[in-house]
Image (tube, helix red, strand yellow):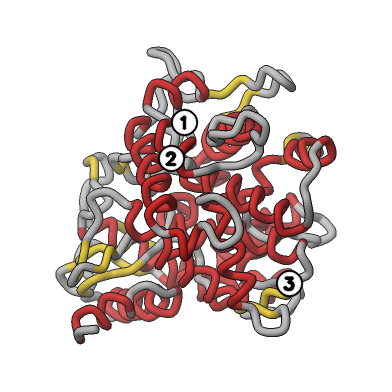
Amino acid sequence: MTSKTSDARALLSAAAVRERADEAFALAEAGKLDGWTLNLDALPSCADFVAEVVRKRYPTLDVPFHARWRHFVFGGRDLWRMIVNEATWRDADAKARAEFDLAITSVLLDAGAGAAWRFEDPTTDLVASRSEGLALASLRLFEWGGFSADPADPLRADAEGLARLDGAALADAFQVRDLNPLEGLDGRARLLNRLGQTVDARPALFALHDAPRPGGLYDVLKARAASGVLAAPVVLEVLLEALGPIWENRPVLDGVPLGDCWPHPQLGYTPLHKLSQWLAYSLIEPLEATGMRIVELDGLTGLAEYRNGGLFIDAGVLVPSEDAARVYTVSDPEIVAWRSLTVALLDRIAPMVRERLGVSTEQFPLARVLEGGAWAAGREIARMKRADGGPPLLIHSDGTVF
């Protein structure tokens, strides 16, 4: 391994995300980060608002982890649990692989849908939009065998099923029409195709005890656990290593795909790994359901996405230097810096929220602050500020980041 390769792989961790975020914060605090002004005087009132949202949503403070599984629950009905209750698996490992398949495909389809798109569920008559709508649509596609090449085993995703999915099939499953547009549709389909190709090409990661499937990563993580204990950052590191090749049009350093990691003129390569960390959070519950114990939850970082980041702009903690009306791309330095600052500010607001709620770090890890929490507060303040509830900055979505 060359020194450049070692440097590249060092960017594939939660610790690297946090380290670069702290560097961005230090520059902003000194007034030297291009494009942004940091107003820490507004952070206490922002923490007040987040704590208020937590108490409103979870009066008993019994907050679950921020994970994809929350988006399968509508009006108290856990739609995945209803499917599970009708299904049978050979053993707990087989069920875990299926839940990994669902979480991975659903999270990868979770980039911003746009304000106009809706999904009408034919099973329950629910109508959902944004992240919940994407979750519901992906759940139904999974349930119907849309990712499986085996008609006798619909509740799975496998290399063949993912590779054959195209934009037209995804559009049909997600009810996309002229009056119901979904941002980044083709990008989502290509991402799942690349997932299928990667799964097929890497049997040591995806086919230890079954045909090649995303859920094969469960077996890798089970093998990495020591006496049934696994650190959450290890979950992310396995995901970043395994899924690196699926990302299209992302930076590559010395042959190493960097994923959601972008060059910034002041910060250098800036890792963020938003979808991968969202997925790491979402895999904790399937792992724990098999009896595994997941530790070091706060070794993962907050998520650098537009709800958390929008919270800090709308609350006045972050002030962009340029006109907010322009349309950005995810690789623009202003967006890279904003997302990195979001990670740093989530670390700094979390203890303030805990203090207001009267809970400890152990009782209320970052995964609960996000769920309770910062993500929900970002959505709520966006609705207060803008009629469509969209983010404060306009960012072109290719269906794979936001």
Q: Is residue 75 left or right of residue 118?
A: right
Badge 3 vs badge 2, beta-carbon distance below 8 Å? no
The residue lying at 59 percent from left, 73 percent from top is 232
Q: Quadrant of residue 235?
A: bottom right
* Number of residues whose C-alpha sits closer than 10 Å to that of mark 2, classed few (under 14), some (14–19) or many (20 or more): many
Counting residues from the N terminus, which is met first, the one under dot 1 or under dot 3? 3
User: Tag 1: residue type?
Assistant: Asp
- SS for dot 3: loop
Q: In this rendering, which labeled residue sits more in front, label 1 or label 3?
A: 3
Q: Pointer 1: what residue?
A: 388
The residue lying at 29 percent from left, 66 percent from top is 37
Indicate which disc residue 112 carries. Answer: 2
Res. 337 in view: no
Q: Position of residue 240 (x, y in %)?
A: 42, 65
Marks 3 and 2 sit apart, C-alpha to C-alpha, by 32 Å
Counting residues from the N terminus, which is met first, the one under dot 3 or under dot 2? 2
The residue lying furthest to the left in this view is 265
User: Tag 3: residue type?
Assistant: Met
Q: Position of residue 396 (x, y in %)?
A: 28, 40
354 or 107, nearer to the observer: 107
Q: Quadrant of residue 321?
A: bottom left
The residue lying at 20 percent from left, 84 percent from top is 2
User: Tag 2: residue type?
Assistant: Gly
159 or 16, nearer to the observer: 159
* Number of residues whose C-alpha sits closer than 10 Å to that of mark 3, classed few (under 14), some (14–19) or many (20 or more): some
Marks 1 and 3 sit apart, C-alpha to C-alpha, by 42 Å
Q: Is residue 176 above or below residue 341?
A: above
* Number of residues whose C-alpha sits closer than 10 Å to that of mark 1, classed few (under 14), some (14–19) or many (20 or more): few
Q: Quadrant of residue 275?
A: bottom left
Q: Pointer 3: what residue?
A: 292
